């Protein structure tokens, strides 16, 4: 496509633009070198920009770059996600070791399903050893230890039976054993 811009004889509409000085200097320099008015020089650059954007080669290259960037971001997110879950599991295991009352720990919810995001919390269910002390202070310390290590909030269930059917179903569907004191 040849670059064309209107001649001085065609009707023009007056507009006002605020341009960066460097761009204005470039337009003025081009106008002087080619003996054009600043308006015609500006129209030349505007036409070249429009022409380049409409060029199929330009669009194809941009589409290919966008595709590669998208794929790279997906791979980075997948890799980050795997290591993030591993870090959560390792942190839970380490925290469980500090409390003899914790017999088993299950991860459930978005981390167990692998659908967690940046704002996801960590959902855990603990099975406690009969006759071994585990009070609210221990539960708070356990939760804080995981929160500080992962930067995520933690929801912990310690009840033997879950009364909420919805929560019980979610737990049964997603549960993943991440700590077993006897099976270490």
Image (cartoon, rainbow, N blue to C red):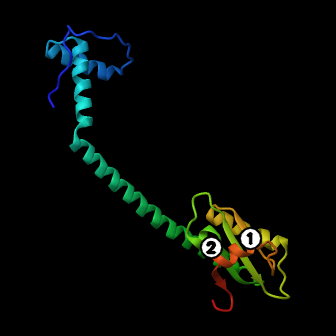
Q: Could you tell me which residue is drawn at 74 percent across and 71 percent down?
A: 167
Instruction: Where is residue 140? Give x, y as percent.
Output: 78, 68
Tag 2's secondary structure? helix
Q: Position of residue 112 (x, y in %)?
A: 60, 73
- Residue 161 or residue 182, whichever sits in front: 161
Q: Residues within 10 Å of mark 2 (few under 14, many from 20)?
A: some
Q: Which residue is mark 2?
A: 91
Tell me which numbered mark, 1 or 2, is placed earlier along the sequence: 2
Q: Nearer the viewer, mark 1 or mark 2?
A: 1
**Marks 1/2: CA distance?**
27 Å
Query: Would you name the residue on which mark 1 appears?
Result: 166
Figure quadrant of the C terminus: bottom right
Name the residue furthest top: 9
Q: Nearer the viewer, residue 46 or 123?
A: 46
Where does the image place residue 99, in percent across and percent down from the top left?
Answer: 75, 80
Task: Give the quadrant of residue 183.
Answer: bottom right
Front-most of residues 60 and 82: 60
């Amino acid at each position: 496509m040849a670059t064309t811009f209107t001649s001085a004889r065609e009707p023009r509409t007056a507009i006002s633009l605020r341009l960066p000085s460097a761009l204005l200097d470039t337009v003025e320099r081009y106008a002087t070198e080619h003996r054009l008015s600043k308006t015609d020089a500006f129209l030349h650059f505007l036409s070249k920009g429009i022409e380049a954007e409409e060029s199929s080669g330009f669009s194809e290259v941009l589409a290919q770059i966008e595709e590669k960037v998208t794929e790279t971001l997906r791979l980075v997110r997948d890799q980050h996600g795997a290591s993030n879950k591993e870090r959560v599991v390792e942190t839970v295991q380490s925290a469980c070791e500090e409390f003899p009352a914790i017999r088993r720990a299950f991860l459930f919810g978005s981390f167990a399903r692998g659908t967690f995001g940046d704002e996801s919390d960590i959902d855990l269910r603990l099975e406690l050893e009969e006759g071994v002390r585990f009070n609210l202070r221990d539960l708070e310390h356990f939760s804080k230890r995981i929160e500080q290590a992962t930067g995520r909030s933690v929801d912990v269930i310690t009840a033997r039976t879950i009364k909420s059917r919805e929560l019980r179903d979610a737990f049964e569907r997603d549960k993943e054993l991440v700590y077993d004191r006897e099976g270490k």
